Image (spheres, rainbow, N blue to C red):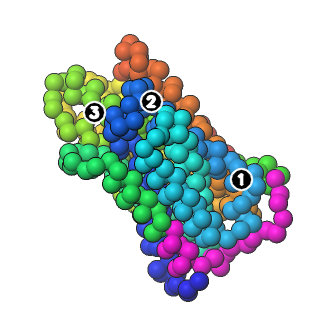
Amino acid sequence: MKTTTSKKILPIIIFSQFCCTSLWFAGNSIIDDLIVFFQLRPESLGYISSSVQFGFIVGTFIFAIFTLGDRFSPSRIFFICSVFAAIFNIGVLYENNTMTTLLLFRFLTGFSLAGIYPIGMKIAADHFEKGLGKSLSFLIAALVLGTAFPYLIKSFNLDLKWELVIWVTSSLALLGGVLIFALVPDGPYQKLVQKFEMSKILKVFKDESFKSAAFGYFGHMWELYAFWTFVPVLLITHSQLHHVTLNISLFSFIVIASGAVSCILGGFLSKTYGIKKTAFFSLSISGICCLLSPLLFMVNSSFIFIVFLVIWGMAVIADSPLFSAMVAQNCDANAKGTALTIVNSIGFAITIISIQLLNVLLANTNYTPYAFMVLALGPFIGLIYLKRS
């Protein structure tokens, strides 16, 4: 493995993380084509979109149970998982796919991402003990851009074959894995354990500081993916209520992608004001946005409406790298991989509950103006636990 200077390592990790996590949303960007090509029912949309999420939850749970991130080289895990993720992603191209096989391929792609997203944060934690919040802010900013990117592509109405999206994202994943394996050695702050310890999952939660960081993250996740999922719905509702025409895909990209800026900004602010205070500030703003959300439906100005969404989009994600940094810093060095993966697993499981709850509320038009207020529950709980630490 080649030696790489520390200044070059972070950009490599960031780029590799972006390349590999592009697989996460590859299915979302071509979902209409998949339904037509494989003659699926329209209701298949929700199942295909969420299968990656379920795969990631199961994968991170298993990675945590077997403490893989703390027992083996994270760079090698990242590389191996990137190869499998790319292969499973290509499986979508199989001409005789059924609904069952498509769900399986997307599930296995999500499972493989469990060895990429949290392990990527583990790699960063092994290299950057000081200024970890800043380092992770760049890493998660890459994930945010990956989330938003399909909306940008769709906004230009490019006539691309859906198969090309699969080939490109799989190629990017392989590139990201190779870069990590070839150019990012094991970090100087890494401490591998020699034996399997299932009890490590419970042990990390015994530390009160760790517990505060973890539950703060859980509150943050209750709001984050539910908001991201329904940003287009907010835009469509506004355009229908006030009879205006909006490029829904473009503004969805702008709202979500603005979080990349706030992630980086939060990383720099954390060096001055501290990680905990910066996270508390961001979580407070996003909670206030949840409570003010009913006013959105009364705003007749598209400019004010979109500015509000951008502020919300920035606040809702800015604390994510900060919570991850607190999780990594408040556990033993030989438990970082397990801590990050189990917290990710629980956090993403929580997103499914909040998304489904919001979906039910939005299905009933009587609750629509107040539906997003339910997301304030997450920031509220998160702030309580931050106060305790």
x then y, percent, for residue 67:
74, 58
> Residue tagged by mark 1?
64
Residue under the image location 22 percent in, 23 percent down: 240
x then y, percent, for residue 254:
28, 48
- Left or right of 199? Residue 327 is left
User: Which span of residues is magenta-colored?
Assistant: 177-198
Q: CA distance from mark 2 to mark 3?
A: 23 Å
Residue under the image location 38 percent in, 20 percent down: 368
Q: Residue furthest left?
A: 244
> Residue tagged by mark 3?
235
Residue under the image location 28 percent in, 33 percent down: 235
SS under mark 3: helix
Residue under the image location 49 percent in, 35 percent down: 98
> Residue tagged by mark 2?
44
Q: Is residue 133 magenta?
A: no
Is 62 rendered above or below residue 129?
above
Residue type, numbered disc 3: Leu
- Left or right of 367? Residue 162 is left
Specify the label residue 87 is tagged with. Answer: none
Is 351 rendered above or below residue 356?
below
**Which image quarter: residue 127?**
bottom right
Using a 10 Å C-alpha cutoff, classify the residue at mark 3 as few (fewer than 14 neighbours), some (14 to 19) or many (20 or more): many
Using a 10 Å C-alpha cutoff, classify the residue at mark 1 as few (fewer than 14 neighbours), some (14 to 19) or many (20 or more): many
